[in-house]
């Protein structure tokens, strides 16, 4: 590329009206120290290159020099990138005021169309952020910002069932262990051989195995080590002693588990999530509120099953007990939310079956049974 071409490209970047807005804040942007997660998002969203990603991290995660020029270039080529940038900046508390100023300036400069940008007030009180999307209007590429942001709420009426499906899955695990016990007992040369083998596979169990004086005691240790989504130790023992029938049982259990996580989520809010997957929604969390109060065992199973369901979407599942209900919050990178919504849409039936009373995606409330009850009471007055 010759100097004339380079000069022309730079002029285009600097003369772009949306890029010009960002240029006014370069000095303040240079003072912001981003987290490594935010820098990774800049790369994932196409605002900086892979090489620049390394450069930014080596410079203390600050946007100065070439990285800032790349961001200006990306915004000039695609004006929606400004919204992406402000979403990422909002993850840093020190950048909230700066982000608010950028949004306000954009709104003043492009007053011909309407769209929603991130809510700075909410971003200042939460580690999660919500973004809308800039829209180019016709050939003039003009857009505006509604700075008086109000949360849009999509409500779906849901009539929760009980937790029977979770219980059935737990019962299948119990049935699997119960049916494999006699097969293992008949196949092992001795209890001591089984104890020695388990101790070599799971060193942390050696202390418990010392106190296991019978086959039933050893099986209790094995059972405690298994969970609704993890029967690895049982499977290892069955493979070690070549117990074909037990192996077939484990395979059948794992197949049912996969189907449970994949196919039981199909009916609830299918219409709304399908609509959301094509909307402007970009966010980072999904919240499930369950109506019933599970015991500790069921509580762990719910968390494990939800994690298994959404693991391909890079989701972190956090389950919190709260009064007579529990809240399950799944954290995911906002750039993967489109994929997560599609996954949820295709796997939602289990939510209804486990007694869902609320579903929140980021700051977007899809369903809240309590809100519906309040509206119904007002209508009856």
Image: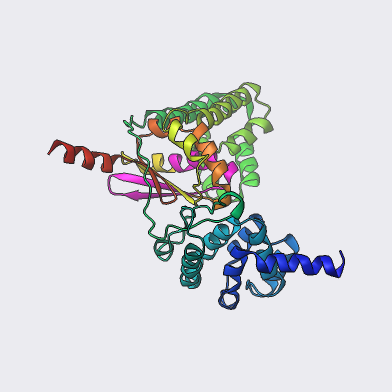
Q: What residue is drawn where x is 22% and y is 41%?
A: 375
Above or below 132: residue 8: below
The picture places residue 65, in percent across and down from the top left corner, at: 70, 75
The quadrant in which the N terminus is found is: bottom right
Q: What residue is drawn where x is 57% and y is 52%?
A: 136
Which picture quadrant has residue 76? bottom right
Based on the picture, tell me whether residue 307 belongs to the magenta stretch. yes
Horizontal side of 157 relative to 255 (left or right) equals: left
* Magenta residue span: 301-330
The picture places residue 374, in percent across and down from the top left corner, at: 22, 42
Which picture quadrant has residue 150? bottom left
Based on the picture, tell me whether residue 105 belongs to the magenta stretch. no
Q: Nearer the viewer, residue 210 or 92?
A: 92
Horizontal side of 111 relative to 38 (left or right) equals: left
Asked if one can make out residue 51 in the rendered structure from this viewpoint, the answer is yes
Horizontal side of 211 relative to 290 (left or right) equals: right
The picture places residue 261, in percent across and down from the top left corner, at: 51, 33
Asked if one can make out residue 218 in the rendered structure from this viewpoint, the answer is no
The quadrant in which the C terminus is found is: top left
Q: Nearer the viewer, residue 344 or 122?
A: 122
Q: What residue is drawn where x is 46% and y is 58%?
A: 145
């Amino acid at each position: 590329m010759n100097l004339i071409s380079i000069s022309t490209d730079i002029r285009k970047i600097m003369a772009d009206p949306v890029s010009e807005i960002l240029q006014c804040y370069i000095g303040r942007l240079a003072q912001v120290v981003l987290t490594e997660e935010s820098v990774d998002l800049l790369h994932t969203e196409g605002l900086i290159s892979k090489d620049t990603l390394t450069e930014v991290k080596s410079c203390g995660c600050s946007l100065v020099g070439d990285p800032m020029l790349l961001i200006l270039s990306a915004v000039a080529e695609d004006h929606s990138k400004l919204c992406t940038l402000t979403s990422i900046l909002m993850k840093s508390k020190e950048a909230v005021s700066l982000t608010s100023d950028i949004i306000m300036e954009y709104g003043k400069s492009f007053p011909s169309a309407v769209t929603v940008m991130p809510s700075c007030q909410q971003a200042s009180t939460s580690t999660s952020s919500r973004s809308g999307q800039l829209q180019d209007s016709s050939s003039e590429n003009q857009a505006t910002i509604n700075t008086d942001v109000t949360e849009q709420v999509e409500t779906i009426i849901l009539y929760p069932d009980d937790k029977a499906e979770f219980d059935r899955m737990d019962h299948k695990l119990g049935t699997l262990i119960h049916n494999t016990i006699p097969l293992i007992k008949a196949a092992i040369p001795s209890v001591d051989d089984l104890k020695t083998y388990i101790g070599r596979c799971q060193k942390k169990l050696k202390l418990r195995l010392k106190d296991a004086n019978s086959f039933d005691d050893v099986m209790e240790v094995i059972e405690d080590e298994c969970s609704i989504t993890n029967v690895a130790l049982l499977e290892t023992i069955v493979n070690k002693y070549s117990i074909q029938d037990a192996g077939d049982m484990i395979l059948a259990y794992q197949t049912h588990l996969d189907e449970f996580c994949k196919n039981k989520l199909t009916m609830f809010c299918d219409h709304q999530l399908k609509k959301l997957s094509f909307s402007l929604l970009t966010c980072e969390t999904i919240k499930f509120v369950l109506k019933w109060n599970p015991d500790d065992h069921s509580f762990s199973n719910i968390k494990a099953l939800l994690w298994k369901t959404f693991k391909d979407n890079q989701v972190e599942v956090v389950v919190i007990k709260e009064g007579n209900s529990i809240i399950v919050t799944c954290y995911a990178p906002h750039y993967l939310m489109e994929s997560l919504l599609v996954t949820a849409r295709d796997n939602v039936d289990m939510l209804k079956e486990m007694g869902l009373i609320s579903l929140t995606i980021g700051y977007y409330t899809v369903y809240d049974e309590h809100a519906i009850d309040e509206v119904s009471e007002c209508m009856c007055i």
